[in-house]
Amino acid sequence: MPEVGIISVLVGAVLALRFRVLALLVAIPFMLAVVAVGGVARGMAAWWTAIAMVVATVSVQLGYLGGSILWLATRHRSRGEASYRSSAHLSGQN
């Protein structure tokens, strides 16, 4: 089950860097289906499969939150550097 959480967090982070939050409406049901099929293929009990589905859902949302924070941090930093460069250029400093 740890691999389900790790993969879900990474998927959520990638979604946050590329898409808006509505992408989770598509990604979560798809991920739930994949986890359910994986649980059946491994012969897991129904309640273990349900727990894995909850872990996947929460993990993808936490990954999306982390990816959004990362996106905001890199966006802010790149804007700050760009404004610093342009102000240095305007003032004649190289």
Image (tube, rainbow, N blue to C red):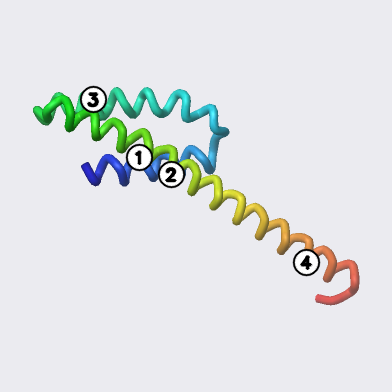
Please give the residue where the numbered disc 1 appears in the rendered image. 8
- Left or right of 36, for residue 66: right
Amino acid on which disc 3 is placed = Ala
Q: Judging from the image, what secondary structure is the residue with disc 4 in?
A: helix
**First in residue order: circle 4 vs circle 2:** 2
* Residue at left offset 55%, top offset 50%: 69
**Distance of mark 3 from mark 4, alpha carbons?**
51 Å
Mark 4 near mark 2, Cβ–Cβ under 8 Å? no
Which quadrant of the figure has residue 41? top left
Please give the residue where the numbered disc 3 appears in the rendered image. 36
What is the x, y in percent for residue 79? 72, 56
Q: Quadrant of the C terminus?
A: bottom right
User: Which circle marks residue 60 in the picture?
Assistant: none
**Distance of mark 3 from mark 2, alpha carbons?**
20 Å
* Residue at left offset 32%, top offset 36%: 56
Mark 3 near mark 4, Cβ–Cβ under 8 Å? no
Amino acid on which disc 2 is placed = Gly
- Left or right of 72, for residue 54: left
- Left or right of 74, for residue 39: left
Please give the residue where the numbered disc 2 appears in the rendered image. 63
Amino acid on which disc 4 is placed = Tyr
Marks 3 and 4: which is nearer the front?
3
Amino acid on which disc 1 is placed = Ser
Above/below status of 82 relative to 48 = below
Q: Judging from the image, what secondary structure is the residue with disc 1 in?
A: helix
Please give the residue where the numbered disc 4 appears in the rendered image. 84
Mark 1 near mark 2, Cβ–Cβ under 8 Å? yes
